[in-house]
Image (tube, rainbow, N blue to C red):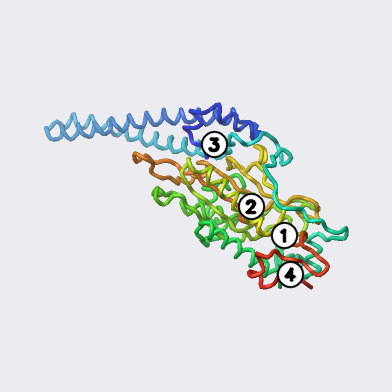
């Protein structure tokens, strides 16, 4: 959530940033927030004046009663009663104005960082660099959805039988590969200085609002109406919310956490090759890395997170590229996002496997996640997160890129985790 002070003091920058996002009603929405804030401040002034007068009259009434001037005291009590009615009305009006202001602020996305390119869609994203070598496969190479049938490692039909489309069943070497990747990613994160946590996979409404999934992505989340809880779309939500309403001592910064969870998303896309097999699911596994740091260190932290994800792809021997997302393709809460994609050889296309984002103070303002700066002043922290990594498309690329007539060769780094070096029939 954008800070009121930023809207007031940096209005031109805010409007330019919203324009880069192609936000259609930027000027009207920002002005609505500023107008409401001005009215709210006027209400607060009236409330405070009435309260001050009531306090002064209470002091005077005490003096009059002591001096025996009951009539004078009763006259002031009448005025005090009127003031109490005013104070109650002002408090109700203030509460309503603050609620309206918060709702207006919830509509506004984060402001893109200066390096974010302009653009409307994924076609306008900027390729920062590429790594690895694309494999050359024979003409009869199979896409992963055929390979998983051939080697009987993932069963979509069983998932449909048990739950529905988008909920695959992993079995045999497929299940062991899942577990191996999760353990590999967690161990790599731990070695990079991240503390592992195992958070709940259901969160309350406050947590959804804290990291910005609500109200922006309400329709994409599975919701338990009876208890008003949401299945997490990513472990970013519970891990970052560990620090909601906290003032974190400077000596404990930066905070680095990692966690594995299943993730749940109601929208799984339309029909077609782009969403076949593991390309898009309702339930999938992911390891997340999260950092919380002082504002002056957040962009350096962001670069280290991207480098960490790149190192995972290098160790998995997967060709990849790093993209800087344009304003029109960035997530609602992000200030700067790098996507990392792997090359899917049998599909001849890039598959997104990670987004690494710096949210600056946007989430922290919702979360009230703060620290005490020099001089004791309380300031908002910056929050960051990244997929390290999401499993489905990693598995898709591993299967497709490493297929041979004798089976699917696995990268050496996974041999000890899997207990085998090749997937075979």
Measured Cα–Cα span from mark 4 to mark 2: 24 Å
Measured Cα–Cα span from mark 2 to mark 1: 28 Å
Q: Write down the residue under mark 3.
A: 104
Q: Earlier in the sequence, mark 2 or mark 3?
A: 3
Measured Cα–Cα span from mark 1 to mark 4: 26 Å
Q: Write down the residue under mark 4.
A: 422
Measured Cα–Cα span from mark 2 to mark 3: 38 Å
Q: Are marks 3 and 1 in contact (CB under 8 Å)?
A: no
Q: Write down the residue under mark 2.
A: 310
Q: Indicate whether 73 appears above or below 297.
A: above
Return the x and y of residue 377 as percentages of the image width and height.
37, 39
Return the x and y of residue 280 as percentages of the image width and height.
72, 55
Q: State the residue in front, 302 or 228.
A: 302
Q: Residue at x 81, y 68 (%)?
A: 150
Q: Indicate whether 307 appears above or below 412.
A: above
Q: State the residue in front, 417 or 44.
A: 417
Q: Write down the residue under mark 1.
A: 166
Q: State the residue in front, 364 or 39.
A: 364
């Amino acid at each position: 959530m954008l800070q009121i002070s930023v809207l007031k003091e940096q209005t031109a920058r805010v409007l330019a940033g919203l324009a880069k996002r192609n936000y259609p009603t930027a000027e009207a929405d920002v002005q609505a927030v500023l107008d409401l804030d001005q009215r709210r401040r006027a209400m607060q002034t009236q409330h405070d004046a009435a309260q001050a007068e009531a306090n002064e009259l209470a002091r005077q009434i005490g003096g009059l009663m002591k001096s025996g001037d009951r009539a004078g005291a009763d006259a002031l009590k009448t005025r005090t009663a009127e003031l109490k009615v005013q104070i109650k009305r002002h408090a109700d009006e203030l509460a309503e104005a603050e609620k309206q202001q918060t709702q207006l602020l919830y509509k506004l996305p984060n402001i893109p960082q200066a390096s974010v390119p302009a653009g409307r869609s994924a076609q306008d994203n900027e390729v920062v660099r590429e790594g690895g070598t694309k494999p050359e496969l024979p003409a009869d190479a199979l896409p992963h959805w055929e390979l998983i049938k051939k080697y009987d490692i993932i069963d979509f039909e069983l998932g449909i039988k048990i739950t529905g489309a988008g909920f695959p069943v992993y079995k045999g070497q497929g299940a062991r590969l899942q577990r191996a990747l999760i353990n590999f990613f967690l161990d790599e994160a731990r070695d990079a200085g991240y503390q592992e946590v195992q958070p709940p996979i259901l969160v309350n409404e406050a947590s959804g609002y804290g990291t910005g999934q609500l109200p922006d992505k309400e329709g994409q989340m599975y919701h338990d109406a009876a208890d008003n809880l949401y299945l997490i779309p990513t472990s970013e939500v519970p891990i970052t919310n560990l620090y909601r309403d906290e003032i974190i001592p400077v000596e404990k910064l930066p905070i680095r956490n990692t966690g594995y969870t299943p993730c749940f998303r109601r929208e799984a896309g339309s029909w077609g090759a782009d969403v076949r097999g593991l390309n898009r699911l309702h339930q999938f596994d992911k390891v997340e890395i999260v950092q919380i740091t002082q504002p002056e260190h957040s962009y350096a932290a962001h670069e280290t997170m991207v480098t960490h994800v790149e190192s995972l792809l290098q160790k998995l021997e997967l060709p990849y590229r790093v993209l800087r997302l344009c304003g029109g393709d960035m997530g609602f809460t992000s200030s700067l996002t790098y996507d990392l994609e792997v090359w899917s050889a049998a599909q001849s296309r890039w598959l997104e496997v990670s987004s690494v984002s710096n949210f600056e103070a946007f989430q922290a303002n919702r979360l009230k996640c703060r620290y005490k700066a020099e001089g004791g002043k309380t300031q908002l922290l910056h929050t960051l997160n990244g997929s390290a990594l999401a499993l489905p498309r990693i598995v898709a690329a591993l299967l497709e890129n490493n297929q041979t007539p004798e089976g699917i060769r696995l990268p050496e780094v996974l041999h000890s985790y899997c207990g085998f070096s090749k997937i075979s029939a």
